[in-house]
Amino acid sequence: MWYGEFHHTLDDKDRFILPAKFREKIKTLEEKKFYITRGLDGCLFLFSQSVWNGLEEKLKALPFTKHEARSFNRLYFSGACEVEIDSQGRIILSEYLKEFAAIKREIVIIGVADRIEVWGKEGWNKFYQEKKKIFEETAENLF
């Protein structure tokens, strides 16, 4: 559903614009609501309403008696917020999400099938440089 790597910058109001390719895809969706939250590996996760609902159900089904489940759900849901995509395809980033992802001004937006990830440029570059070296080995082990 979401694919590609795009480099953008935050404006003075901490907004970023979604890539044109993504904005066109959003026009075809029935639900225009999105959620952004703390992701894994130092990025932010942006989900459409339908994907968010599915994940929410799975996470709510985890046993609250398990410490790991409680901790994960607390961090995941407390970091989440519904975001409005304005008429120009922009989203405002809250200060706590910027801090979590070490986002200053330059960002990288990547499509990862069912989610969009938002990275600080430095974080993405570090991740990419580390993982590209083992990309083929990882593929061999996974498949």
Image (cartoon, rainbow, N blue to C red):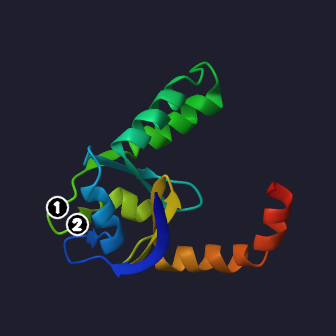
Crowding around mark 2 (Cα neighbors within 10 Å: few <14, some 14 to 19, many 20+) is some
Q: Which amino acid does label 1 sit on?
A: Asp
Q: Relative to residue 55, is residue 130 drawn left or right?
A: right
Q: Give the labeled residue for mark 2.
A: 89
Amino acid type assigned to the residue bearing label 2 in the image: Gly
Relative to 64, say whether 76 is above or below.
below
Q: Can residue 19 be seen in this view?
A: no
In the rendered view of the protein, which quadrant contains the C terminus?
Answer: bottom right
Q: Residue 86 carries which label?
A: 1
For image coordinates 56% across by 21% down, the residue present is 64
Q: Is residue 85 above or below residue 109?
A: above
Q: Tell me if residue 31 can be seen.
A: yes
Q: Residues within 10 Å of mark 1 (few under 14, many from 20)?
A: few
Determine which of the numbered discs, if any, sits on residue 9 in the image.
none
Residue 57 location (% of width, % of height): 47, 28
For label 1, the SS is loop
Please tell me which residue is depicted at 49% across the width and 72% down the height of the picture. 4
Q: Disc 1, disc 2: CB below 8 Å?
A: yes
Relative image position of residue 125 (x, y in whole percent): 58, 80
Q: Is 58 placed left or right of 90 in the picture?
A: right
